[in-house]
Image: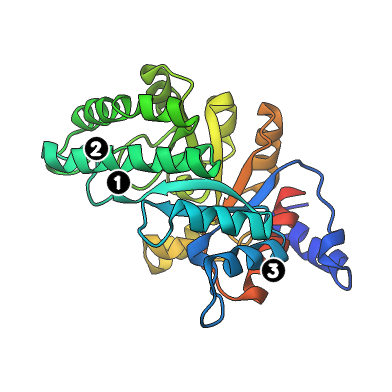
Amino acid sequence: MNRRHFLTAATAALAGTAFAQAPKKRPLKKAVNLGMIKGPPGATIADRFKMARDAGFEGIELNLPDDALSVEILQQAKAASGVEVAGIICTPHWKYPLSDPDPANRERTVRGLQLALTQGGEIGCKRVLLVPGVVNEKVNYAECWSRSIEGIKRCLDAAEKAKCHIAIENVWNQFILNPVEAARFVDEIGTPWVGWHFDIGNCVVNGWPEHWPRLLGKRMLNLHIKEFSRKKANDEGLRKGFGVELGEGDVNWPAVMQSLDDIGYTGYGIAEVPGGDAARLKFLSERMDQLFAS
């Protein structure tokens, strides 16, 4: 049965059944980014955490540092909802990449990563996502490699003190485009405090997501869940490839799930797709259940 037929059958099987009874055969946990949760006017951070919980999510991903998200506010939201912080995205890493030719710009992300790690430790989060650098006309591959490793190493003391890992993500940055390079990059840093945040949808344009988990193994710390359609990318423009619902693109979800089984991954799968209101969140949660059971 291919993935589209699977999803059709799974949706039919779930019709008329309470969401809480949806089958789940893998111990993966579902999460959603806080920015995807569109609460009613006046909704607090705690209200949005509760919306995620009510839709069936167990975790929230945050973008930090953020002056509007103090440790106190986040602790209160966790306590009120029972939802954990599944991951943190280090916010300065695109504007001021660790590969930037200007040391002052690199320093901004070093400081931002150190602060995100510290906040992670304070709110009980174990993983901070980092885009390590960008290769472009001003930064060659070797420079990106060496500068990003140097910057990451400057944050290892903060990671160890906070008991919070640095999780490198595969993105469209012309850098680390296959799992062999990803494993080598982590191993060159040489510490258990650095691993990988695997974005499933991001790598479809360059290969097959199911190849990554087996090569990354225990280096894999977190997952981003999103889809990609090669046809839409070819017909409408590259970034339009992301414009399909989960399970309706070219990710072979059963193969990806099998590869996660093979390495014993039991962490979070964090949705990184268009969000919305309570109904949209419930749809995404149920669709992720179907994918996780494939």
- Residue tagged by mark 1? 93
Q: Which residue is nearer to you in this view: 182 or 33?
A: 33
Earlier-in-chain disc, 1 versus 2: 1
Q: Position of residue 48 (x, y in %)?
A: 58, 67
Q: CA distance from mark 1 to mark 2?
A: 7 Å
Q: 229 or 214: which is nearer to us?
A: 214
The x and y percentages for residue 149 are 29, 26
On screen, residue 55 versus residue 158, left or right, reads right
**Residue in view at x 37 percent, y 24 percent:** 157
Please name the residue that numbered disc 3 is placed on. 282
Q: Secondary structure at mark 1?
A: helix
> If you read the primary sequence from the N terminus, does the residue marked by circle 3 or circle 1 appear first?
1
Tag 3 near tag 2, CB within 8 Å: no
Q: Residues within 10 Å of mark 2 (few under 14, many from 20)?
A: many
C-alpha distance separating marks 3 and 1: 31 Å
Nearest the viewer among 211 and 15 is: 15
In the figure, 14 relative to 174: above or below? below
Residue 146 as seen in the image, left or right of residue 166 = left
Q: Which residue is mark 2?
A: 98
As drawn, 289 above or below 41: above
Give the CA distance from mark 3 to mark 2.
Answer: 37 Å
| Residue that sits furthest to the bottom in the current view | 41
Q: Is residue 187 left or right of residue 99?
A: right
* On screen, residue 92 above or below 52: above
Q: Residue 218 falls in which quadrant of the image? A: top right
**Label 3's element?**
helix
Q: In the drawing, does residue 20 fall left or right of residue 175?
A: right
Classify 10 Å Cα crowding around label 3: few (below 14), some (14-19), many (20 and above): many
Q: Residue at x 60, y 76 (%)?
A: 277
Residue shown at 67% from the left, 59% from the top: 81
Disc 1 marks a residue whose amino acid type is: His
